Image: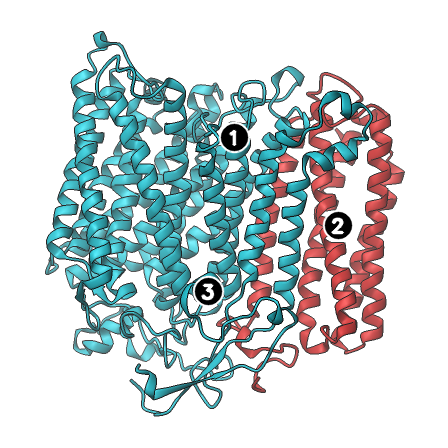
């Protein structure tokens, strides 16, 4: 590989007309597409709000302090993600591993909260087929949970890959792209948390 | 470029999986095609597959027309088969023919037009093709199960719900479309990145050929519109498989939500189908009028405007569903407004023809047919933009006439123009002009004979999707004319395919630049060498290749885009693409895009087949929910795991391939 191009990029062929790497542009485009996925799901949820014939209602089962805690954990994982990227850009592999694993761990805590919440709601009578609230709630938050789970797998893959010499300062872009995805999934959760949980106490 | 002038040196990198699935250094034979990541080969694969489905969809259409040729016609096909035929005809023609044919051109032509060596993500491009191929097979094997989808290509809930469409037909349709959507989105992410980031030095956006522009706009439409259908299909799938209530009115669900989500996708989809042929026609008209495209910035701008406005008109498909006056008025207005940029394009095309030296070759004939017929389709479209008219025309043959004018008369004629125009680029051989004119006139007369009378049928009240009608409706003669026209089109298609095979084998050799064309893809040999451009082209103006050939025709006026001083110097640090001491690096083939696509499609097939694996109710009583689900979806899970494993193997695979070194250092 020739020497020209940014020192953070291993392959100069990957830098294009705009001076940005292809993969970064594609990730932003994918996130735009993903916005539309969540847009359609959140619209479905909001349209079906208050249309359920059978209970339980959102107010009866939501536990805002609990979900706020899990949301806080997820947001803090974004902070760890930033630190992980900064570490690998400084070529600090040890710190990268700590923060990367930490991000995945915080993501897993969020997923654990979600499993607990789903189980709890199910026992409280909210099922996938019991009401439109159940259908739209589980499918929306479940889709988000799948995104988090894929992100956790991605981060774990990077963590293990770092022991084979696959994650280096010159390949920090790999981490940056995983980070873009991770931050996006976090931001979507803020929207979902507001539109699904907090909205019940506002309007 | 003869092989003596260059030598090939394999790249040393070898990965873990190279021992299990050996990779070719240079693509050769069948394995070369299966593992190919070359945009040109993938383009050909897309084109051939789409043309095969075109025959299948055409056969379905012929059977529909034979069934309808006279009143009270019984004994040919049953009403149920008829339902499957029109459903699969629509689904096939839209998702397996017109879209992938456009994608074939995106793949083959767009990278050449912008002066790139390949697309940004060659293996993802291969994944997109295999996904399309396997999904299209999945959708069509439903015929062999006797479960072909039969609820029309729009799949309106609640008819698609489990209580009205039991069996596998629903899953075949849902999963098939879902997987095709993945192929389209992945492909489009790739094309957009390629256009944004891989233009040759000097190829600013306003010097980019219109076809590449339309590729860009279409790409954005696909990545932003397909999520809507993905979500409504997913919701429907949950309704059918897991008993959710999204479209179950009895539990408070809203079937109308299906229509909204479907058409939020479905209307941009219409522009996804028509914008690429508009781009092709915008390339062809200037070449065969021997004039620059009239109003290039306006053509590009109106293409973008159509793309944006395409998202604001979806409810005009739903005027009869009782939206309320304000919504109806708003969508009627936006629908009429979208005719403005379309009209701008048509006037610009006419402006290009005006005072041109017209050469009536086959691509030109198809382009002119496109302009006329697309305009006709646009006029009837404007008529049902008027909601009051639409109430009368909704679900009648008037609508059938309208969208066939837009999709055959527009999209297909435009694509045929492109096929005739770029065929020499792909094969190095020119399709025969005599046969080309025969195909055009039979298709043109046959098409207008089939679909123009349908306007009358519609206004006289003949509804869509009926498999026969009573003799005293007075529709017999016109239907007979329509069927006759369809047979003429069939003759044209048969001759077209015969000519295609004949020419690809032993047609007239086209030579260099057979059309005296304007854009840079014609500045390289036909067919292009595997590396496309030996030296990255330096683009100085719009229609760069033309002005390189005929510098005296350059108009030195206030038109900025045509000034030689507009030259943007290449920055070798950024555009280090041309061959140097390292030679040209060609990436190696890969098995994993195909394996990943195969895995996901097997997974999809597993979901379709889940009904066969449901344990009987007595045995199920003693099982946990989880083990029932595992039994039911074992094939789906297995396929999914195969897909994910292939993606990981793909991510770890080194680039491989080979370097091409040229012995002589002369340019051209």
Which chain contains the residue that carries disc 1? Answer: B
User: Image quadrant of residue B250?
Assistant: top right
Q: Residue at x 49, y 36 (%)?
A: B264
Q: Chain under label 3? A: B
In the image, taking residue B600 as reference, residue B402 lies left or right, namely: left
Instruction: Report the Cα–Cα distance between label 2 and label 1.
Output: 30 Å
The quadrant the C terminus of chain B occupies is: bottom left
Q: Earlier in the sequence, mark 3 or mark 1?
A: 3
- Chain that appears cyan: B
* Residue that label 2 marks: A149
Category of crowding for the residue at label 3, using alpha-carbon neighbours closer than 10 angstroms: few (below 14), some (14–19), many (at least 20): some
> Which is more foreground, mark 2 or mark 3?
3
Judge left or right: residue A37 versus residue B579. Answer: right
Q: Which residue is mark 1?
A: B260
x then y, percent, for residue A86? 77, 71
- Report whether residue B273 is seen: no
Q: Nearer the viewer, residue B451 or B540?
A: B451
Label 2 Cα crowd, 10 Å radius (few <14 / some 14-19 / many 20+):
some
Picture quarter with the N terminus of chain B: bottom left
Q: Please state which of residues B553 and B333 is positioned toward the viewer in this rendering.
A: B553
Chain depicted in red: A
Residue carrying label 3: B31
């Amino acid at each position: 590989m020739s020497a020209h191009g940014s020192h953070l990029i291993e392959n100069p062929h990957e830098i294009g007309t705009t001076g940005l790497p292809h993969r970064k542009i594609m990730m932003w485009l994918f996130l735009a597409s993903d916005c539309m996925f969540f847009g359609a799901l959140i619209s479905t949820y909001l349209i079906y709000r208050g249309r359920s014939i059978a209970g339980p209602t959102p107010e009866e089962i939501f536990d805002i302090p609990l979900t706020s805690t899990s949301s806080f954990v997820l947001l803090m994982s974004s902070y760890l993600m930033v630190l992980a990227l900064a570490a690998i850009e400084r070529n600090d592999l040890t710190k990268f591993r700590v923060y990367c694993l930490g991000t995945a761990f915080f993501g897993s805590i969020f997923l654990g909260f979600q499993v607990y919440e789903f189980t709890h709601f199910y026992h409280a009578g909210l099922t996938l087929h019991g009401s439109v609230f159940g259908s739209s709630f589980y499918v929306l938050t479940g889709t988000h949970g799948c995104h988090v789970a894929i992100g956790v797998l991605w981060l774990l893959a990077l963590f293990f890959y770092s022991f084979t010499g696959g994650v280096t300062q010159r390949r920090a872009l790999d981490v940056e792209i995983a980070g873009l995805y991770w931050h996006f999934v976090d931001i979507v959760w803020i929207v979902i948390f507001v539109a699904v949980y907090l909205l019940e106490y506002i309007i | 470029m003869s092989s003596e002038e260059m030598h090939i040196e394999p790249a040393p990198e070898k990965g873990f999986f190279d021992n299990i699935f050996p990779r070719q250094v240079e693509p050769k034979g069948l394995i070369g095609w299966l593992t190919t990541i070359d945009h040109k080969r993938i383009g050909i694969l897309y084109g051939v597959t789409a043309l095969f489905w075109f025959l299948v969809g055409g056969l379905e259409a012929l059977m529909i027309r034979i069934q309808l040729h006279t009143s009270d016609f019984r004994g040919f096909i049953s009403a149920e088969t008829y339902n499957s035929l029109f459903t699969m005809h629509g689904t096939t023609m839209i998702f397996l023919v017109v879209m992938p044919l456009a994608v074939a051109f995106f793949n083959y032509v767009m990278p050449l037009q912008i002066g790139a060596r390949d697309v940004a993500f060659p293996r993802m491009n291969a994944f997109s093709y295999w996904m399309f191929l396997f999904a299209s097979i999945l959708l069509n094997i439903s015929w062999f199960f006797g479960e072909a989808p039969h609820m029309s290509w729009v799949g309106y809930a609640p008819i698609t719900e489990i209580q009205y469409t039991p069996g596998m037909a629903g899953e075949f349709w849902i999963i098939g479309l879902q997987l095709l959507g993945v192929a389209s989105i992945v492909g489009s992410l790739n094309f957009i990145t390629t256009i944004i980031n891989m233009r040759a030095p000097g190829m600013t956006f306003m010097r980019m050929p219109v076809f590449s522009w339309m590729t860009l706009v279409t790409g954005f439409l696909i990545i932003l519109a397909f999520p809507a259908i993905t979500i409504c299909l997913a919701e429907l799938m949950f309704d059918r498989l897991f008993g959710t209530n999204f479209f179950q009115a009895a539990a408070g669900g809203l079937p109308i939500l299906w229509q909204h989500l479907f058409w939020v996708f479905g209307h941009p989809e219409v522009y996804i189908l028509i914008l690429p042929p508009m781009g092709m026609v915008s390339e062809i008209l200037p070449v065969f009028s021997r004039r620059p495209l009239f109003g290039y910035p306006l053509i590009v701008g109106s293409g973008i405007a159509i793309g944006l406005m395409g998202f604001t008109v979806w409810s005009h498909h739903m005027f009869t569903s009782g939206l309320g006056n304000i919504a109806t008025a708003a969508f009627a207005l936006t629908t009429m407004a979208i005719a403005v940029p379309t009209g701008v394009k048509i006037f610009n095309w006419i402006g290009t023809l005006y005072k041109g030296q017209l050469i009536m070759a086959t691509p030109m004939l198809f382009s002119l047919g496109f302009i006329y017929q697309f305009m006709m389709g646009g006029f009837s479209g404007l008529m049902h933009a008027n909601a009051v008219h639409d109430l009368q025309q909704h679900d009648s043959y008037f609508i059938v006439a309208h969208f066939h004018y837009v999709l055959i008369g527009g999209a297909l004629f435009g694509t045929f123009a492109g096929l005739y125009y770029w065929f020499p680029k792909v094969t190095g051989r020119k399709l025969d002009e005599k046969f080309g004119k025969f195909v055009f006139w039979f298709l043109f007369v046959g098409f207008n004979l089939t679909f123009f009378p349908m306007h009358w049928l519609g206004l006289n009240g003949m509804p869509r999707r009926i498999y026969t009608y009573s003799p005293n409706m007075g529709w017999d003669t016109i239907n007979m004319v329509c069927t006759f026209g369809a047979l003429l089109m069939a003759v044209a298609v048969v001759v077209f395919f015969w000519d295609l095979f004949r020419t690809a084998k032993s047609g007239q050799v086209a030579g260099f630049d057979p059309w005296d064309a304007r854009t840079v893809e014609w500045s390289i040999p036909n067919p292009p060498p595997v590396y496309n451009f030996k030296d990255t082209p330096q683009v100085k103006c719009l229609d760069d290749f033309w002005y390189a050939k005929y510098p005296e025709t350059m108009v030195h006026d206030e038109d900025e885009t045509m000034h030689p001083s507009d030259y943007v110097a290449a920055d070798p640090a950024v555009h280090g693409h041309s061959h140097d001491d390292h030679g040209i690096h060609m990436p190696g083939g890969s098995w994993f895009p195909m394996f990943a696509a195969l895995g996901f499609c097997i997974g999809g097939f597993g979901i379709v087949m889940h009904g066969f694996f449901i344990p009987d109710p007595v045995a199920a009583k003693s099982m946990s929910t989880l083990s029932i689900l595992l039994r039911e979806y074992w094939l789906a899970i297995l396929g999914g795991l195969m897909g994910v494993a292939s993606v990981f193997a793909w991510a770890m695979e080194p680039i491989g391939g080979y370097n091409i070194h040229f012995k002589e250092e002369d340019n051209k």
